[in-house]
């Protein structure tokens, strides 16, 4: 039996994989990629496993765990630097490093589980910042071409919690990430009222960098947005749904009901998936499916208990999404990623079939 994916995901769910490889030396990637690239499918690449729902039957192919670590800094002038982080570097560690070095641009991304290499896939964001805001370039491995190459932000199709990497699963593997950060002792402007309240400042204020970063960690902990190391909420994948887009009419109705209406970076109106779940009758601690419960902190996080399976977790996602659709006519899109086995046809399309770029 192969390596269990349950041992490498924060939900601790998932069966065996045919072959499990760990990438921890950036200089050894070429050899590892040649070893991993089978004739019939590209491998599934796993970061910290904090956003992965692996199947109970496992994965019929090769899985690569990105475990490379390292952060380097390159000056870009008096006020800016480029920070280059390896894909396996935990995002929280990168944020802590930047704050300690007096570098602003990602200070509101602290406390988010996962690796730096996974952040551009989801275009990870929080408190008004997203990873694409400061991205300068990415080194990626293109499984179609069989070589590494550089991508710039304009080539990544970034949007709200999405990117080219998410739209084309398995095509590109991120090897390292470059960010343009500012040398500053103060943070980016505060855009969220509850964070402003925690810091006792007004919206738009720019508090000291370290204070702002610590306030984010405290706020995330208080709202059940961190990944516990033990206890009933330890087995989770964070928020299980994206904040959904809504129409102007829906926004008016939600405001009248006292609910939140948010505007994403592309101008799309959205509302809180967590608010919708609670309005539909799902509350912290409620059982949703066998072995699967809403976390004790909030309804938007599902936790796996001893009798949970990947199938029951998937059922819980369906139960929640169906209930919200039936009640509010708003469709929720789940966040946890299921390993996708990319066929040879997807890797090497027939002439006349053009890959989306």
Image (cartoon, rainbow, N blue to C red):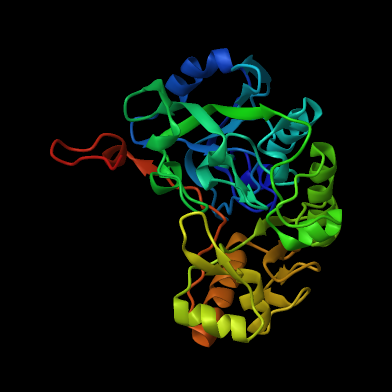
Pinpoint residue 135: horizontal percent, then vertical percent. 54, 33
Q: Is residue 325 visible?
A: no
Residue at x 56% of width, y 58% of height: 335
Q: Nearer the viewer, residue 242 or 65?
A: 242
Pinpoint residue 202: horizontal percent, then vertical percent. 78, 57
Q: Quadrant of residue 107?
A: top right
Q: Quadrant of residue 16?
A: top right
Would residue 16 appear left or right of 141 to someone viewing this image?
right
Residue that protrudes farthest toward the top in the picture: 27
Q: Is residue 284 visible?
A: yes
Residue at x 77% of width, y 51% of height: 227
Q: Nearer the viewer, residue 229 or 214?
A: 214
Residue at x 79% of width, y 38% of height: 209
Residue at x 79% of width, y 62% of height: 223
Q: Nearer the viewer, residue 179 or 338?
A: 179
Pinpoint residue 60: horizontal percent, then vertical percent. 46, 43
Pinpoint residue 232: horizontal percent, then vertical percent. 83, 62
Relative to 141, residue 31 above or below: above
Would residue 356 appear left or right of 103 to someone viewing this image?
left
Residue that protrudes farthest toward the left in the picture: 352
Relative to 353, residue 245 above or below: below
Question: Which quarter of the figure is the N terminus placed in?
Answer: top right
Question: Which quarter of the figure is the C terminus placed in?
Answer: top left
Q: How many marks?
A: 0
């Amino acid at each position: 039996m192969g390596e269990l994916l349950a041992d490498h995901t924060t939900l601790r769910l998932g069966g065996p994989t045919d072959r499990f490889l760990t990438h921890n030396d950036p200089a050894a990637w070429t050899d590892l990629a040649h070893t991993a690239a089978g004739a019939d499918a590209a491998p599934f690449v796993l970061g910290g496993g904090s956003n992965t729902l692996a199947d109970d039957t496992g994965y019929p192919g090769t899985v690569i765990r990105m475990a490379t670590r390292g952060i380097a800094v390159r000056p870009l002038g008096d006020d800016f630097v480029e920070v280059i982080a390896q894909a396996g570097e935990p995002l929280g560690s990168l944020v802590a490093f930047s704050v300690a070095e007096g570098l602003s641009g990602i200070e509101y991304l602290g406390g988010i589980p996962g690796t730096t290499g996974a952040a551009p896939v989801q275009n990870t964001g929080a408190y008004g910042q997203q990873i694409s805001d400061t991205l300068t370039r990415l080194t990626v491995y293109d499984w179609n071409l069989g070589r590494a190459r550089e991508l710039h932000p304009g080539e990544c199709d970034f949007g709200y919690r999405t990117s080219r990497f998410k739209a084309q699963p398995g095509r590109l593997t991120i090897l390292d990430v470059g960010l343009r950060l500012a040398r500053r002792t103060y943070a980016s402007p505060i855009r969220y009222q509850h964070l402003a309240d925690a810091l006792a400042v007004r919206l738009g204020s720019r508090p000291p960098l370290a204070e702002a970063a610590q306030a984010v960690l405290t706020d995330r902990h208080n709202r059940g947005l961190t990944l516990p190391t033990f206890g009933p909420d330890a087995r989770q994948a964070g928020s299980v749904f994206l904040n959904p887009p809504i129409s102007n009419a829906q926004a008016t109705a939600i405001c009248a009901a006292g609910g939140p209406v948010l505007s994403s970076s592309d101008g799309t109106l959205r509302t809180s998936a967590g608010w919708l779940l609670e309005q539909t009758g799902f509350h912290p601690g409620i059982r949703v499916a066998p072995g699967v419960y809403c976390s004790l902190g909030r309804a938007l996080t599902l936790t796996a208990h001893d009798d949970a399976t990947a199938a029951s977790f998937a059922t819980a996602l369906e139960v929640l999404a169906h209930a919200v659709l039936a009640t509010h006519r708003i469709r929720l899109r789940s966040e946890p990623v299921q390993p996708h086995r990319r066929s040879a046809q997807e890797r090497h399309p027939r002439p006349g079939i053009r890959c989306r770029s």
